[in-house]
Image (cartoon, rainbow, N blue to C red):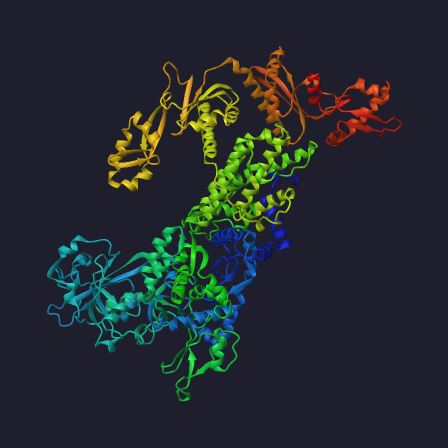
Amino acid sequence: MEDVCEGKDFSFPKQEEQILQWWTDIKAFETQLEKTKDLPEYIFYDGPPFATGLPHYGHILAGTIKDIVTRYQTMTGHHVTRRFGWDCHGLPVEHEIDTKLGIKSREDVIRMGIDKYNEECRSIVSRYVGEWEKVITRTGRWIDFKNDYKTMDLKFMESVWWVFSELYKKNLVYRGFKVMPYSTGCKTPLSNFEANLNYKEVPDPEIMVTFPIVDDQDGASFVAWTTTPWTLPSNLALCVNSNLVYVKAKSKSNGIIYVVAESRLSELPVEKAKKGTSNGALDDKTKGTSGKSKSSVVAYEVLDKFPGSSLVGKKYVPLFDYFKDFSETAFKVVADDYVTSDSGSGIVHCAPAFGEDDYRVCVENKIINKGENLVMPVDDDGCFTERITDFSGRYVKEADKDIIQAVKEKGRLVKSGSFTHSYPFCWRSDTPLIYRAVPSWFVAVEKLKSQLLENNEKTTWVPAFVKEKRFHSWLENARDWAISRSRFWGTPLPIWISKDGVDIEVISSVEELETRSGMKVTDLHRHKIDHISIPSPRGPEFGVLHRVEDVFDCWFESGSMPYAYIHYPFENKEYFNQNFPGHFVAEGLDQTRGWFYTLMVLSTALFGKPAFRNLICNGLVLAEDGKKMSKRLKNYPSPMEVIDDYGADALRLYIINSPVVRAEPLRFKKDGVYGVVKDVFLPWYNAYRFLVQNAKRLEVDGLEPFVPLDRATVIKSANVLDKWINSATQSLVHFVRQEMDAYRLYTVVPYLLKFIDNLTNIYVRFNRKRLKGRTGEKDCRTALSTLYHVLSTCCRTMAPFTPFFTEVLYKNMRKVSNGSEESIHFCSFPEVEGKGGDRIEQSVNRMMTIIDLARNIRERHNKPLKTPLREMIVVHPDAEFLDDIGGKLKEFVLEELNVKSVVPCNDPLKYASLRAEPDFSVLGKRLGKSMRVVAEGVKAMSQEDILSFEKTGEITIATHCLKLTDIKIVRGFKRPDGVTEEQMDAASDGDVLVIINLQHDESLFEAGFAREVVNRIQKLRKKSALEPTDLVEVYIKSLDEDASVSAEILKSQETYIKEALGSSLLQFSMIPKHAVIIAEETYKNISNCDFQITLSRAALVFNENAIIDLYAGNTKYAQALQVYLLSRDHSNLKLEFQQGKGKIKVSCIENQPPVDVVLGQHVHLTVGDYFANTKAS
């Protein structure tokens, strides 16, 4: 393995860019696909985005989810085809061209020519493809851009035709009218999904209008309320609720008589009569119907009360005469439950061309006939037609004021005002939507409703509530789907109709169209096929059939994606049949009413199956302030800026470890991405760097290069921390497999975070001596091999999540492993090798809890870790755990907490009082109303009850049997008599109780001073930017009047200091004159002692007499030899002595005889070696 830099010098973005280039060089993605081609298929459907805009965080989020899942499935033994797709048709493209060319109406397109218009559309579809590929690739996602699919490709469009033809054959297609959200800006109806994308708070007029009742003996008028005055010219009916009570009320001030719902009487105006006004003519300005006037009830005399049902069929005088040709069937009262008593007047005016309920009730009551051409008084641009003579050519929303004025002049205005409400605007043109009946082709979704609900149950969604609530509710209320659009750039409907409407032919393929028409077809867009006619099946005398003008809603195209992207059924028939439904889809929450819905509808209609088996639904990524991300407001950092600063892996983990993967919103914070670098990647990198450094140390020490022991040998290690980390690694693999198989991506990062923390702060930290070789070479290689295999397994486990970082580590680590794959992404996902050791993992977790609790006690009493303490008592009923703490884990507890002894205690009442608490989170749902009684019973449990419960594992309270998981046993500290808090204190997490003896003990002073000295040395090493592998010698010089005091202390603590430093602490008087000093610092009043610490490079120590003897007393030769040896590189000289088994021949000094220099006899490589040798002799 090659040396690696410090974490602070490791640039994650630059390393990622190097990996990206390397992946390109070795064709990593293509190689992975080739290597897995014979494995079972895993089918992933990638929803097509529009390429007319740049990718944002929503795309990166969904793309990351898709990449993680597909990488995981590849590593677990599947072949996963990943092709990018593009949504090329529809409003986004047309709107951009309309804006570019200044197109305002449908007629503008016709004048320009559909061919030119469509080619303009085609020209911009791929404008940002390069930018998309750059951004998506930079995020680490592996997907095929070269073999992508486009909804405008001939093969894709042909499959869409086939889908439609199959629906037509199944009698699931019909032509009708549908009142739909309509964009006058884009001149097309929108789906309900699109209509919900852009709501704004806007003011609108609200008025009450009278409709005099024909032949009413009192001359009364119905009062209807509306917020869309522009629909009044199209009024054909009034609607009441049969079950509401209505009143005939007379104004006490002016005698005018109105009919309204009793509950809405308070909404009528209160005003003195005006001379010369006809029936119903009032001009009351109001701010809205929400503010109720109690005086209204007093101001009106109720003449009669009657149910709404009694009003049905009554005729009234229309407001305008534009529809007088409908007089026989129209201008009467009908009833329906959609009329409510909480707004307006309880009477709704119906204009069937402009309201879904209006259209429905008018059809049901035979005012208009379903299927007949509906009179449409508003054109495609939202302007009144010639039928509305007084307002012809006027844009409807702009005509509101004049229509109100006309109503007022007719004496029919009761009340006028304005109110602010949430109103839908077109998501593309930003113009207000209107509801308008449009002729459309429909898929009869309502016929499929029960089957759709059944198929939904066969799918798995993460999170489940989106499926069970939101999507289920959407399917339950599913309406027939209007799939046609009166537009130009899209897949044309393959419907050819005769002029008289008798012949309808649906074409299913290019071949069929060519056969029926006798013409060659190379493109299915409108300008390429609109001129093609086919003969009437009734014979030539009936002329020819021409195609209807409409194109498909682009949601129909994307819903056809599972078939169209592989050109089914014209190609890949066997492949499709073997692999449908697909295994996985993932998109945002908004797609529950979009792509997820259309996928489900079409697959159910075609095959009676869901289109997918598993689905991950993500929430929205918002700006840090909780608002929608806005380019105009610049309230978020660009994705590439974040990646350039912190790397794509950090961004991936940040968004995966957030509420957004649970379909909740994420407030994006750039600092959060940095937090991932700091908390996950740097500790992970440091553990890896520690492995590399200490593996290289073996070579520096002249030992065999590091080659990891095989996995089977490592697993058999008797070392308790090796056993623990091996078990924890298996638990990690098991957990990630379990969660990934269930598509719960969001649970993985917290678990990884804890694992990395444990690896660095427990395994590496507690194992430093072993890893640095201070417990012998064999033990060192075992520890290094364990760390190697743990990091290797961790990298393979996390490769789907962090593809770059794991590749960086793997590329270096594989250099010491024969037969390994070239890339980590060619490796298999780790298998779970047996069950993890629950006991050892639990014991180590509890040990860390003990350490944390003990640290808390020290902090409370201002006892730093450098201060040794005599005793710590650990109280717990689990004898096996206490055996571990008092046995194999004891040394780590003693060293970490600087206590002299650990006393295990399994007598729960000796130092503790027990208290039982019910676990409300567990019991609440189960017990319901019984919770209070049970909770009181649990809290009343005696010490003996609790001990018995812990032993048996269950207890019955108020007829309910409670288990260990239902009750929390809290252990509180019971201080012995006569002992103060300053002398003994405790801490508990409710499971383990830790007690520390805090009393001062003079005998512990020496150990405390030694720790203080070691602590200062380690800090000075760090301050000097020394690497752990840097060989230095440490000297101490007492600055006290009596230097013997500190010298005696250090002598008594010599073993501890040598273990902590890895070398002896030397007296400053021993430092050679030629030693190179690295750092020097003076310390005052440390445990009442003053001293100086000096760090120097390793320096040779010569036995001058022995060297002079080598040259038979020639001091000049002896001095020349010393100069020569001092000029040599220390590490190379050390290596030569090792290779010569402690002896080297020096024959290169000019005019001097060759001599054999013996290590330990003529020279020592370090002062420490000389000191140890002298001490031993």
Q: Quadrant of the N terminus?
A: top right
Nearest the eye: 886 or 806: 886
Q: Is residue 289 above or below residue 761?
A: below
Which quadrant of the figure has residue 1106? top right
Q: Looking at the image, is 714 positioned above or below residue 180?
A: above
Give the vertical position of 707 relative to 911 (above or below): below
Q: Quadrant of residue 1061?
A: top right
Q: Position of residue 809 (x, y in %)?
A: 60, 43
Q: Can the viewer see residue 644?
A: yes
Residue 261: image x %, image y %?
Answer: 17, 60
Q: Is residue 371 left or right of residue 142?
A: left
For the residue pair 326 and 208, the one nearer the viewer reads as: 326
Image location of residue 974, percent across then percent down: 36, 21
Whether residue 686 can be seen here: no
Left or right: 607 as drawn, with respect to 346: right
Q: Residue furthest top?
A: 1042
